[in-house]
Amino acid sequence: MKIYVISGLGADFTVLEKIQFPQHHEVVFIDWLIPLQNEGFIDYVKRMAEKIDDSEPFYLLGYSFGGIIVQEIHKIKPARKVVILGSIKSDKEKSRLIRTGQITRIPKILPLGLFNDKAANMYGVVRKLFDPKNPKLMQYFKVRDPYYLKWSVEKISDWKCEENPDVIQILGDRDIVFPIKNSRPNYIIKGGTHLFPATKCKEVSEILGEVFK
C-alpha cells in the first residue's frame, strides 16, 4: 500500500530521510506547491491531493504543516490511516502564539518582505537555540518563496478543524511549535523537539512500523 507523505512548512524531505518506513509499503512524497495568488486553502488542498491515487487504499502521513494538510486531504480523499508528526489534530491545540495570530489577524497584514531569505536565515538562528544538536536545520528549509511562506503562516493561523479521533498523532515532549500540553497524542517522543523526525528517527521508525504493520 502507498503512504503519501507531506513534509513541514518550507521543508523538503531530507528532514524525514532517516526514517525507516515499513518495507512492504511504497512511500510517495508530495512536494509543496506554490499557492496561486489569493488561492483559498481548500483549493490549494485539492491541488495537493491531485497526486494521490484514491482508486486503491492508501495511507497519509504529514509532518508539522504537512500534518494539517493531510487531515484536510483526508476529507476529500479518505485514507485508511492518517498519521501526523509534530502537528495538531484541531485548532483547539494551537499554541498561544498561533492563537494570538488568529485573533489579531497579524499574519495577514505582515509585509511580504518579512518572508525573504534574510528572514528565513534569522528563523534558522532562532530555531537552533531550541534544536542545538541539529546543525542541518537550514538544509531542510528549501521552499523559501516569500508568498508561499506568508500564505502558509496565514493558513496555519486561521485553520479551524474538529478533532478526528482516528487521526494518529505523534508529538515530541519538547516541541515549542505545537506544545504537548495542548494535546493528547497517541505517541510521545521523549526529548523530542519539533525536529524529532530527524533527531529521533529510530523511535519514529519503530512507531510507524507498528502503526503501518
Image (spheres, rainbow, N blue to C red):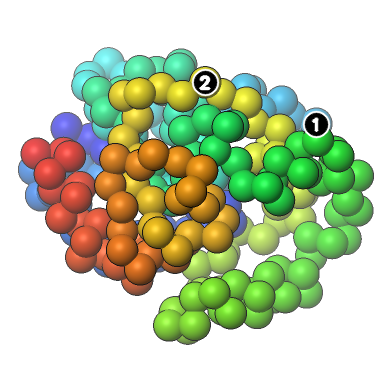
Q: Where is residue 51 in the image (x, y as percent from the top left)?
A: 42, 31
- Total number of numbered discs in the rendering: 2
Q: What element carries label 1?
A: loop
Between residue 196 and residue 57, name the one nearer to us. Answer: 196
Instruction: Determine the residue positioned at 29% across, 40% down.
Output: 186
Q: Mark 2 points at which residue?
A: 162
Residue toward you, 42 or 127: 127
Compared to residue 160, the image places residue 138 above or below, namely below
Location of residue 132 in the rendering, given as x and y in whole percent from the top left corner: 49, 82
Q: Can residue 85 be seen in this view?
A: yes
Looking at the image, residue 49 sits to the left or right of residue 209; the answer is: right
Q: How far apart are marks 1 and 2 (CA)?
A: 25 Å
Of callouts 1 and 2, the N-terminal one: 1
Q: What element carries label 2?
A: loop
**Picture coordinates of residue 182 (x, y %)?**
51, 43
Question: Which residue lies at the image location 44% right of the left edge and 79% below the top edge?
Answer: 134
Front residue of 37/22: it is: 22
- Expressed as whole percent of the image width and height from the top left, the position of residue 125 reads 65, 79
- Amino acid type indicated by mark 1: Asn
- Left or right: residue 132 versus residue 21 is right
